[in-house]
Image (cartoon, rainbow, N blue to C red):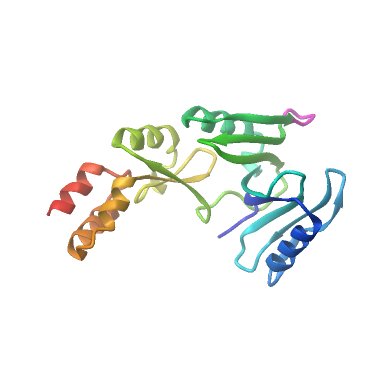
């Protein structure tokens, strides 16, 4: 189930662009924060669309981009900075671009990069009845078994959630740690080889490249 714990933050260069996006996304959806002026933005709105996916639309001078936005609430409130430090320590071309604490010392707003991909996060308080779910996960493409092992061992914290390359970290955020070998072998034009690879993968928790190649070879 989608929840507001992970939303997509969209910067728009013009009011016309923002209003157009809002009208399309709100159709069949629900506004969480109405589209209007706020102390932090000339024009901003937060909604979930008819599929349940949450979006934050903001008027900004910069070019449009779509940024995953993580909100740490409930038991995870207060852990945003810890998560950001962990994530940025694991991936190359990563770093913290902006961090603003609130009076309690929690993250009021933060922006960071993971392998060049922009992210945002906040600590959202404890008075919420939602949290992170598997509905949105972050896909990590790996070139080797060593890379798979690196991310898997650093992130996986919930053994019962490990399945087919999926894991859940200690904050409840879900990740897919997938070697490009899996995609290549499953895309083989020989349906029997592809089937064997799929069946092998379905028996795995962490993806094992050697096991995939053995299944492929038959």
When asked about the image quadrant of residue 198, the answer is bottom left
In what quadrant of the picture does the N terminus appear?
bottom right
User: Magenta part of the protein: which range?
Assistant: 101-105
In what quadrant of the picture does the C terminus appear?
bottom left
In the image, farthest residue toward the bottom: 28
Examine the rendered structure and indicate whether residue 25 appears above or below residue 206. below
Considering the whole magenta stretch, tell me its main secondary structure.
Answer: loop
Q: Is residue 192 left or right of residue 49?
A: left
* Image coordinates for residue 33, horizontal then vertical, percent: 78, 56
* Image coordinates for residue 148, horizontal then vertical, percent: 35, 38
* Image coordinates for residue 117, horizontal then vertical, percent: 55, 40
* Image coordinates for residue 16, horizontal then vertical, percent: 79, 60
Residue drawn at the location 38% of the way across and 46% of the way down: 162
Examine the rendered structure and indicate whether residue 123 appears above or below residue 66. above
Residue drawn at the location 50% of the way across and 38% of the way down: 170
**How many callouts does the rendering have?**
0
Q: Is residue 165 left or right of residue 35?
A: left
The answer to whether residue 61 is magenta is no
Examine the rendered structure and indicate whether residue 72 appears above or below residue 20. above
Residue drawn at the location 77% of the way across and 31% of the way down: 102
When asked about the image quadrant of residue 20, the answer is bottom right
**Residue toward you, 39 or 59:** 59
Q: Is residue 32 left or right of residue 38?
A: left
**Residue toward you, 117 or 72:** 117
In the image, farthest residue toward the left: 218
Examine the rendered structure and indicate whether residue 59 appears above or below residue 76. below
When asked about the image quadrant of residue 193, the answer is bottom left
């Amino acid at each position: 189930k989608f929840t507001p714990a992970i939303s997509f933050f969209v910067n728009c260069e013009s009011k016309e662009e923002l209003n157009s996006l809002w009208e399309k996304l709100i159709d069949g959806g629900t506004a969480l924060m109405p589209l209007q002026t706020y102390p932090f933005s000339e024009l901003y709105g937060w909604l979930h669309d008819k599929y349940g996916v949450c979006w934050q639309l903001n008027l900004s001078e910069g070019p449009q981009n779509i940024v995953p936005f993580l909100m740490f609430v409930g038991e995870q409130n207060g852990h945003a900075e810890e998560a950001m430090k962990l994530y940025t320590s694991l991936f190359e071309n990563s770093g913290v671009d902006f961090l603003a604490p609130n009076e309690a010392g929690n993250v009021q707003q933060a922006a960071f990069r993971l392998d060049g991909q922009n992210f945002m996060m906040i600590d959202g308080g404890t008075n919420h009845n939602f949290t992170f779910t598997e509905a949105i996960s972050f896909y990590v493409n790996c070139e080797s078994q060593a890379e798979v092992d690196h991310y898997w061992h650093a992130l996986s914290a919930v053994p019962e959630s490990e399945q087919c390359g999926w894991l859940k970290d200690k904050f409840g955020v879900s990740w897919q740690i997938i070697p490009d070998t899996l995609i290549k072998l499953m895309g083989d034009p020989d349906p029997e080889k592809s089937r064997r690879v799929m069946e092998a993968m379905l028996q795995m928790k962490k993806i094992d490249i050697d096991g995939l190649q053995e299944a492929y070879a038959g």
